[in-house]
Amino acid sequence: MNNRLRLAATLGGLVLVALSLAACDNSPRPPGDTGVCYQYVTPQTGQHRFNVVSKSTPTLENCAATLEAMRIRFLMLGGNQTSITGAYQSKFIFVEQDGIFTADSLNGASYLALVRANDGRLVRPGAFRP
């Protein structure tokens, strides 16, 4: 029984530490405006900005496709930025060469939203077999 109390106290302490670290998170929060797709940028000054890309975007996938088209246009114009960060309805969107990822915070865990098919299209995970 003594070991159980010690384990419970240790787990309780770990939970308190995790909660206090989460409370110290001062990373930017994505805007929650309905239907608005943003590009997230950090200029040289270090101040973050959310630039409106589209105001009538129905889904996160549509926002991701808009950001992907913007990424490709930048590359075609001679840019070297291979990834773009955006936001849609309180979610961050990370457009990478491997696919599209989404997260609740800028530095938190990200989840695969869309993958690239063999022909380069973005599709839902599991929608094709390699």
Image (cartoon, helix red, strand yellow):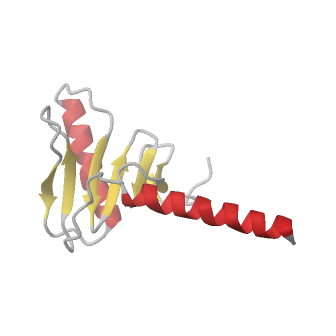
Quarter of the image where the N terminus is located:
bottom right
Q: Quadrant of residue 72?
A: top left
The residue at 55%/60% (across/down) is 127
| Left or right: where 15 falls relative to 42 | right
Q: Quadrant of residue 2?
A: bottom right
Q: Is residue 113 above or below residue 55?
A: above
Is 48 drawn above or below residue 6 in the view shown? above
Which of the 4 image quarters holds residue 92?
bottom left
Q: Position of residue 48 (x, y in %)?
A: 18, 46
* Residue 21 versus residue 11 in the image, above or below: above
Query: Where does residue 40 sit, x and y in percent of width and height?
Result: 22, 49
Q: Nearer the viewer, residue 119 or 10?
A: 10
- Residue pictured at 68% horizontal, 60% vertical: 10
How many numbered discs?
A: 0
Q: Residue extending furthest right?
A: 1
- Most foreground residue, 98 or 103: 103
Q: Is 59 situated left or right of 114 in this image?
A: left
Percent from the top left, x then y, of residue 50? Answer: 16, 53
